[in-house]
Amino acid sequence: MTKQHKLPELLAPAGSPEALRAAIEGGADAVYFGGSAFNARMRAQNFSGEAMAESIDLCHRYGLKAYVTLNTLCTDRELLPLLQSAAEALNAGTDALIVADLGAAATIHRYFPEAELHASTQASGHSVGAARELSKLGFTRMVLAREVDAKNMRRFVAESGLETEVFIHGALCVSHSGQCLFSSLVGGRSGNRGECAQPCRLPDARGKYPLSLKDLSLARHIPALIDMGVCSLKIEGRLKSPEYVRDVTRIFRTLLDEGRGATDGEMRRLAAIFSRGGFTDGYFTKQIDRSMMGVRSEQDKADSAGQAPFTGITRRIPIEMRFTMWADAPISLTVTADGKTATVLGDIPQAARTAPMDKAAVERCLAKLGGTPYRLRALDATVGEGLMVPVSRLNALRRAALDALLPEKHTVTAPTVLALQAEGVRAAAPTARFQQVSQITPKARSYFEHLYLPLDRYDPAVDGVVLPPVILDDEVEGVRQQLQKAVAAGAKHALVGNLGHLALAREAGLIPHGDFRLNVTNTATLQTLLSLGFADALLSPELTLPQIRDIHGATDAIVYGRVPLMVLEKCAGLEVGTCRTCAEDKNQLVDRRGEKFPVLRLPPHRSLILNSRPTVMSDKKEELQRAGLPGGHFLFTLESPREVDAVISAYRKGTPLSGAVRRI
């Protein structure tokens, strides 16, 4: 290990006040938890009001930082309540806000510029380019995508300019975070809004689990993470028990303090706390294969049943006190704990009429630390003769001194009115993307204003390219070369689905258009993207027509096609088919109800899972017009040229398409 790097922060989850205390007991350096709204674990107990303030104070007494999550997407009508939640957390003393919605982050930064912002993993950051754009919005830290391998992680830490937070243990989403619409579009429960129903953990029609990954654990890689200079190591688990939080945190505390990787015995202990058939480090080591798959067996559940109950914090903070009481001067108490010192003054002592206060009486009173996190290590009391103060005033002095050890809180006030306005107007003409150039018919050329193909399949027959949803840093140069070739062949426009890819499109000379993957659900996010250089943006497929109507400016929305539900770093095709069928885009996932979800291959070997039903609004022209959608964006993936023409004809005539469909 390189000696120059200090130990990373150990960041533990807290889904309840009890779990927060368990994190303190386990030795965490920081905790993260959600408020009563706008956090990605709405099923957790969470915190609000006095409970939040008291919990943050408790963390600060023990020397921990406390981060509050506001990491869900919000609509225009929710942005003001989100700002009020941010103000509540800041007034309670939070050290940082963890945010996913780009518009929410930019708005928080505008109204509360002193607030420290951490970009949630739901913001889909996986590259140095993403960090550079996020820093413009006020972020100081980015939670790096779990799919990033060790080589790219090291590069990110060195070049990003932001603090790097890395997940080291806990459940793995099979999809890139912030890029999963499965639970939302199929089940009506949005993972981007904290309500994921975890369809990836369910069996398919064969009774197999093609999307269920083992839990992540980088416990063996602690020395490498220290050596990289990673700022924060994050344990997943806001829905886990206090016992889980305590015991997992305790093991990682030991590994960090000793600067070593876990032994076989420690890995077995971690598995006994909670696992799904063991752990995986496949993304970190770039061993992305079937060994990553796992489900929670009955044996796993039995192993987890033996944890000792968490009964409270046993740790106590040593404290030193120095007290003085002299005639004609206020009594004084100085306390020192964990490197922090505070001095408070009290009443001027009175001349004792009968029983003056002696040193022993003062010490007995000040030493009463029950119910606090402290234990008395030393007390130096100087008491003048013939003096006294009421015991109640000594007790008040002690409480005031202990409270003075807490960091000063600053009050912020949330706005009561929020004016949202974005430049531009809705697209008036339809646009479309295609999977293959062979799908593009003469009718399509005349109907759509702009045509797009995937970058790796670009053809001069179209004027636009779709950038890959994921471009890791060691893939950037290859993408840059592909873009140069596409521009030389005539490309003018680019659909960009990640902030980290914006600079690539612009430096190639392409006009960048925001893809649906940017999760635009409010006008503030649209404003933010336009300010960064996007010409316009597609709105999130999660929005309803009334919510789309609320957002004004240079936007459009998907009105036809099989919306991609997941972007997987791991090939899902091999779990449901073969290498040949994967390469030919012929694989499909069949769920327990018989719904068929096509699985496409993305370069170099990622997977894209499409919705089983296309979104179809061909017979809903009036509804689209009321929502202000004169144009519309079309996704053509598996359609034949004849089917493409049939779709265009249906939209021209306002007639329905056959088969099972999804509506906006």
Image (tube, rainbow, N blue to C red):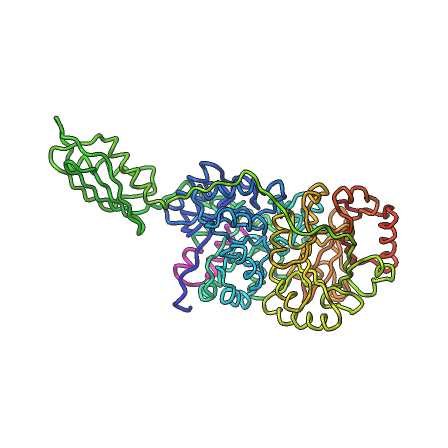
Q: Relative to 96, does residue 282 appear above or below in the rendering?
A: below
Count of labels in the image: 0
Front-most of residues 70 and 12 = 70
Front-most of residues 616 and 298 = 616
Queried whether the magenta region covers residue 268, the answer comes back as yes
State the image coordinates of residue 207 (x, y, percent, origin top left): 71, 51
State the image coordinates of residue 632 (x, y, percent, origin top left): 77, 51
Queried whether the magenta region covers residue 115, the answer comes back as no
**Side of 144 relative to 1 (left or right):** right
For the N terminus, give its image quadrant.
bottom left
Residue drawn at x 54%, y 41% as measured from the top left: 44
State the image coordinates of residue 318 (x, y, percent, origin top left): 29, 47
Residue 197 appears in view: yes
**Side of 643 relative to 78 (left or right):** right
What segment is highlighted magenta in the picture?
252-276
Q: Relative to 567, does residue 42 appear above or below in the rendering?
A: above
Q: Relative to 256, does residue 317 appear above or below in the rendering?
A: above
Residue 207 appears in view: no
For the C terminus, give its image quadrant.
top right
Predominant secondary structure, magenta span:
helix
**Side of 323 relative to 15 (left or right):** left
State the image coordinates of residue 653 (x, y, percent, origin top left): 88, 48
The quarter of the displayed image where residue 53 is located: top left
